[in-house]
């Protein structure tokens, strides 16, 4: 038995009128009775189209400054009645309730109001009550009612209306109902998260309505998806679609370069979420050249990011390297044309967007959530553990190395000199192994470590690391401190004329 329904009446109550006019005109063309209220009613009247005020149905005016308009049994009875239920149909007649076949709602912009920095009172007033109730009622009764719950669905509904001449199947209505509950659940999650911004209630609600299917996940046999508004964060200028692994590397690159925002030109090259090259120089061109020198082998197929505009000279250098993604705040026109020379190379402009203040990852049969590590080590916050104090240039190198260390997989050691990454030991099970790896790598690319500095993401429980560093020529060390055996490392440094500073902050990255 067919359960097709023809739309004969509609209730329209929307915040955004964009795209509504053609729908209203088509409904009018199909002789659909239109009910409305407030600004939407005026909008329809101004189009010269007949509209029945909801107040004429309820015999009740809009009250409480518009807070109560549609919340009435005659409205919700018209939506929630079951057309195949004789008792429901009889009650519509007894109480003079009009049948409503279509509900179109676009909710108050709660999230946009919060994002705008509006006052608490303005935000509270953007918590939609009538609209969300209409959505839930119409979506619940999808067996008989079509629910269009967002301006984003106006065009799809208009096409359906025109191609089927107002007739809908149950599958059509169920699809719109699913979209409606997506809208309502997302809306309520946003409201809850606003009220629970300090996480006093230990409840996690994540709702991302912008989903993108990726080619695959970490490996070709895994499905992959990205949920988030990528276009808010980046302007993509060129290249193929980003993969799951590309996105992870881009995330690592952005978080690292945020440490150098507004500073002298800096350039980083990342591979597998870790920096394999990094330098800070007077020009972006020299920063790139010196970043590449840090590890030209690993740079192949890497992710490149600059904290300033990429110019023609730098683009010419980059163009000779096979790289997956290039990110910058801007590109000169000449640079853009050069870099577009490789059709698959992804070029992204990084917009000024605030990143989420919490990080989330699955763990066992649940989820781990933590505050973002927003602490950046600075010269002002250092404590000087040794008799020998670092020079001004060594202090700058120590902070430079510390920033990179913070964004490198633990256990890690970072070696730097003259604001250039010499090498890192990444993701090792022992800090000694990380240091030995870094020294070996630096020497393999002909770095002179005499006068270099060392950064560690955690304290040294033994003096072995400072001794190995000393033998390699390193003369200054930055580390969190806090080991019960700190004095052993301090003593070695004092005996061997090494400067060591403590940050007091550990930066593990697992």
Image (cartoon, rainbow, N blue to C red):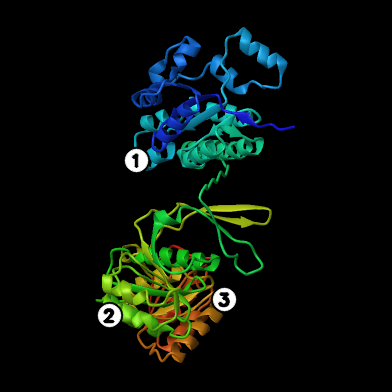
Residue located beneath label 3 in the image: 428
Q: Earlier in the sequence, mark 3 or mark 2?
A: 2
- Residue 271 has which mark? none
Q: Residue 79 location, x and y as percent?
A: 58, 23
Query: Would you identify the image quadrant in which residue 51 lies?
Result: top left
As helix, strand or loop, the secondary structure at mark 3 comes to loop
Assign a secondary structure to mark 1. loop
Q: Is residue 260 above or below residue 177?
A: below
The image quadrant that residue 254 belongs to is bottom left
- Picture disc at residue 117: 1
The crowd level at tag 3 (other Cα within 10 Å; few <14, some 14-19, many 20+) is: some
Say which label, 2 or 1, has the lower sequence index.
1
Sequence-wise, the earlier of marks 3 and 1 is 1
Q: Is residue 314 toward the left or the right of residue 454 in the image?
A: left
- Determine the CA span between mark 3 and mark 1: 44 Å
Residue positioned most to the top:
94
The spot of residue 207 in percent (x, y) is 54, 45
Q: Residues within 10 Å of mark 2 (few under 14, many from 20)?
A: some
Taking the spot 49% from the left edge, 13% from the top edge, the residue there is: 57
Q: Relative to residue 136, is residue 189 depicted above or below?
A: below
Q: Nearer the viewer, residue 202 or 162?
A: 162
């Amino acid at each position: 038995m067919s359960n097709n329904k023809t739309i004969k009446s509609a209730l329209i109550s929307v915040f955004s009128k964009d795209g509504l006019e053609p729908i209203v005109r088509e409904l009018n063309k199909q002789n659909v009775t239109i009910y409305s209220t407030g600004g939407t009613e005026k909008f329809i009247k101004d189009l010269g189209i007949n509209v029945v005020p909801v107040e004429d149905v309820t015999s009740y005016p809009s009250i409480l400054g518009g807070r109560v308009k549609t919340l009435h049994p005659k409205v919700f009875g018209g939506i929630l009645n079951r057309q195949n239920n004789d008792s429901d149909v009889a009650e519509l007649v007894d109480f003079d309730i009009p049948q409503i076949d279509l509900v179109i709602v676009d909710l108050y912009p709660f999230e946009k109001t919060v994002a705008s920095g509006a006052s608490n009172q303005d935000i509270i007033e953007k918590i939609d009550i009538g609209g969300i109730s209409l959505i839930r009622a119409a979506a619940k009764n999808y067996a008989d009612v079509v629910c269009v719950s967002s301006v984003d669905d106006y065009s799809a509904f208009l096409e359906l209306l025109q191609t089927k001449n107002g007739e809908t199947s149950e599958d059509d209505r169920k699809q719109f109902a699913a979209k409606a509950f997506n809208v309502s659940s997302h809306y309520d999650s946003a409201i809850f998260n606003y009220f629970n911004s300090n996480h006093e209630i230990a409840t996690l609600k994540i709702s991302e309505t912008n989903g993108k299917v990726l080619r695959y996940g970490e490996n070709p046999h895994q499905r992959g998806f990205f949920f988030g508004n990528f276009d808010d964060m980046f302007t993509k200028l060129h290249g193929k679609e980003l993969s799951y692994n590309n996105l992870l590397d881009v995330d690592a690159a952005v978080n690292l370069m945020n440490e150098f925002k507004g500073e002298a030109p800096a350039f980083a090259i990342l591979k597998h979420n870790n920096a394999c090259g990094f330098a800070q120089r007077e020009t972006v061109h020299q920063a790139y050249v010196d970043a590449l020198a840090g590890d030209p082998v690993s740079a192949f197929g890497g992710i490149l990011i600059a904290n300033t505009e990429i110019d023609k000279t730098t683009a010419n250098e980059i163009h000779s390297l096979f790289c997956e993604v290039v990110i910058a705040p801007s590109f000169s026109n000449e640079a853009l044309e050069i870099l577009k020379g490789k059709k698959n190379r992804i070029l992204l402009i990084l917009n000024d967007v605030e990143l989420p203040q919490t990080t989330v990852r699955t763990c066992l049969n649940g989820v781990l959530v933590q505050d973002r590590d927003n602490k950046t080590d600075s010269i002002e916050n250092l404590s000087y553990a040794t008799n020998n104090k670092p020079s001004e240039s060594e202090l700058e190198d120590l902070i430079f190395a510390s920033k990179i260390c913070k964004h490198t997989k633990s256990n890690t050691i970072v070696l730097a000199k003259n604001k250039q990454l010499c090498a890192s030991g990444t993701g090792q099970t022992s800090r000694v192994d990380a240091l030995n790896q870094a020294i070996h790598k630096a020497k393999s690319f002909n770095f002179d470590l005499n006068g270099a500095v060392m950064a560690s993401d955690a304290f040294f429980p033994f003096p072995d690391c400072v001794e190995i560093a000393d033998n390699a020529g390193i003369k200054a060390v930055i580390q969190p401190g806090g080991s019960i055996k700190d004095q052993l490392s301090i003593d070695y440094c004092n005996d061997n004329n090494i400067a060591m500073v403590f940050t007091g902050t550990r930066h593990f990255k697992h």
